């Protein structure tokens, strides 16, 4: 009886503490050092709770991902108690959420405002915590917030972007500020100070790039000037006239707002490097904002992927390629001379749309024919050594013109994107035997018709033996396929 009474008393007390219909205490969102750890199950909840939700979609296994994570974590410590909620999503683990938010790739940092899940504000890829803090500050500010006594920065080696405007409430100032928001790693200032305008002899609204108070370049504002125009100007003139491709500059080059890139593939230790690089640099001056000039050292092992992408072999350097990063169409400088005027003419024909793009179908059609042996001279039209072989190749064609199973051809290697793993420079003599397999044999013997025919006959005899084996293998394969089909038919009949 006492036990029953005690139970009733306890129940009554609990009834007072937890009235009927009361909800349970809400479980807090998981966090590490002030940064929410979000997944598909709690992302929407965090979105509803946050006026400003800054999310880092992290890829922990990548080098860039680790760098951005460190910057994000440091910025989170600075933003404690602010109106910005910091959160991270591991895209390698929560692939469904990343796909749903279209966040599987860059940009890695996005700001969600007032619960809007579908149109986040993209944060420029941060170099460090200061990048994130500056971006947030500029987003929340106005053009007037960029007013500064930039004379204090005259000893700085960093570039300073200064907007000289007669009226800081003008549309030009708004464009200027919009560009500043998207470039948080660049120092900006804005002024309408008459003394400063007089000092730099300003007669119109203009944006100056300054280094130690020295004018690097000027951009005259116009009614049609957009934020993108100004960002392109600042970004390009931040870079060297010719930028060497390496681990530190790769991201800057690939994300530059100029899609047309001129690439000089050259060995930095070569005797001609200084002269060719000087000509390349001189040509580059005329194409700022139109073509980005990049130098690639073919001796650098870490550039291997880039060389592979453009199908450039170290032995072919020096050479110059032009490529548009939007359509990835590639063009080759048709000259073995690399002076300034030749490079400038090449770039201009490219911009005019009259340059000849690289194509890859000609070689495949001629060489990889299983019923004919092709002996091909791969040449460069501007090479004297290549042209010297033309008469010999014509003699060889006449010597074997009665043989229907042989094709003698010459192909312009500069106008063909040759998809072959072959090393060495041009001109090159290569034989493609009449086989189903794409076999290639280099000729390195004497350059006489007699020796060429002897080599041709020898390789054709070898190919006959290979062809017999190929035919046997193909026959076995066809018979095996027929047997497999017969099995399937019998099984179907049995099932019926």
Image (cartoon, rainbow, N blue to C red):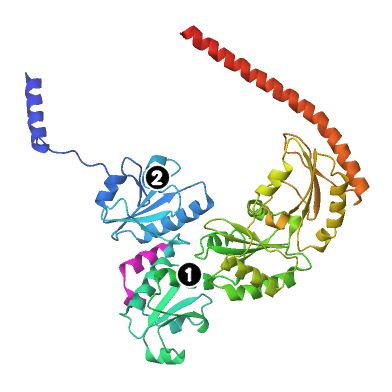
Picture quadrant of residue 389: bottom right
Horizontal side, residue 455 vs residue 169: left or right:
right
Mark 2 highlights which residue?
98
Q: List x then y, in percent, for residue 334.
A: 70, 63
Picture quadrant of residue 28: top left
Q: What element carries label 2?
A: helix
Nearer the camera: disc 2 or disc 1 = 1
Q: What element carries label 1?
A: helix
Could you give the CA–CA distance between mark 2 and mark 1, rounded to whole angstroms? Answer: 30 Å
Answer yes or no: is residue 29 visible.
Answer: no
Q: Is residue 375 located in the magenta-colored stretch of the structure?
A: no
Relative to 8, residue 103 above or below? below
Q: List x then y, in percent, for residue 394.
A: 84, 53
Horizontal side, residue 311 vs residue 88: left or right:
right
Q: List x then y, in percent, for residue 491.
A: 52, 11
User: Depth check: 101 or 94 in front?
Assistant: 101
Neighbours of disc 1 within 10 Å: few (<14), some (14-19), many (20+):
some
Q: Which image quarter holds the N terminus?
A: top left
* Circle on res. 55: none
In the image, which residues are magenta? 132-146
Horizontal side, residue 473 vs residue 98: left or right:
right
Give the residue at x 88% y 46%: 399
Mark 1 highlights which residue?
232
| Of callouts 2 and 1, the N-terminal one | 2
User: Depth check: 278 or 363 in front?
Assistant: 363
Give the residue at x 32% y 40%: 41
Neighbours of disc 2 within 10 Å: few (<14), some (14-19), many (20+):
some
């Amino acid at each position: 009886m006492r036990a029953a009474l005690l139970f009733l008393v306890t129940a009554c007390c609990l009834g007072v503490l937890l009235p009927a219909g009361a909800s349970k205490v809400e479980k807090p969102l998981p966090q590490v050092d002030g940064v929410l750890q979000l997944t598909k199950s709690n992302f929407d909840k965090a979105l509803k709770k946050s006026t400003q939700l800054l999310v880092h979609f992290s890829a922990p296994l990548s080098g860039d991902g680790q760098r951005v994570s460190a910057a994000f974590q440091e910025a989170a410590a600075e933003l404690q108690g602010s109106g910005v909620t910091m959160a991270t999503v591991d895209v390698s683990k929560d692939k469904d959420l990343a796909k749903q938010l279209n966040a599987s790739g860059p940009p890695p940092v996005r700001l969600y405002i007032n619960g809007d899940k579908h149109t986040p504000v993209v944060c420029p890829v941060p170099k460090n915590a200061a990048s994130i803090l500056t971006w947030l500050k500029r987003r929340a500010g106005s053009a007037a917030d960029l007013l500064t006594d930039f004379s204090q920065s005259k000893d700085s080696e960093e570039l300073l972007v200064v907007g000289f405007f007669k009226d800081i409430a003008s549309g030009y100032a708004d464009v200027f500020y919009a560009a500043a928001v998207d470039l948080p790693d660049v120092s900006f200032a804005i002024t309408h100070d008459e003394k400063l305008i007089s000092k730099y002899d300003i007669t119109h609204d203009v944006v100056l790039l300054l280094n130690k108070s020295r004018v690097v370049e000027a951009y005259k504002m116009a009614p049609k000037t957009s934020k993108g125009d100004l960002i392109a100007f600042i970004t390009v003139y931040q870079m060297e006239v010719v930028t060497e491709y390496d681990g530190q500059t790769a991201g800057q080059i690939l994300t530059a707002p100029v899609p047309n890139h001129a690439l000089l593939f050259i060995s930095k230790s070569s005797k001609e490097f200084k002269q060719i690089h000087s000509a390349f640099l001189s040509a580059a001056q005329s194409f700022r904002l139109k073509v980005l000039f990049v130098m690639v050292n073919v001796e650098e092992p870490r550039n291997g992927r880039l060389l592979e992408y453009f199908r450039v072999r170290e032995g072919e350097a020096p050479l110059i390629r032009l490529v548009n990063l939007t359509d990835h169409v590639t063009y080759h400088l048709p000259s073995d001379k690399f002076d300034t005027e030749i490079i400038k003419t090449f770039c201009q024909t490219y911009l005019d749309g009259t340059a000849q793009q690289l194509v890859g179908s000609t070689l495949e059609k001629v060489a990889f024919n299983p019923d004919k042996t092709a002996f091909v001279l791969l040449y460069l039209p501007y090479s004297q050594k290549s042209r010297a072989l033309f008469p010999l190749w014509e003699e060889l064609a006449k010597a074997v013109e009665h043989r229907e199973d042989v094709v003698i051809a010459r192909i312009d290697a500069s106008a063909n994107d040759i998809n072959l793993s072959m090393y060495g420079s041009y001109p090159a003599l290569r034989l493609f035997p009449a086989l189903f397999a794409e076999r290639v044999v280099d000729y390195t013997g004497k350059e006489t018709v007699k020796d060429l025919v002897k080599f041709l006959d020898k390789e054709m005899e070898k190919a006959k033996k290979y062809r017999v084996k190929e035919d046997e293998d193909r026959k076995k394969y066809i018979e095996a396929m027929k047997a497999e089909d017969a099995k399937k038919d019998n099984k179907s009949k049995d099932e019926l």
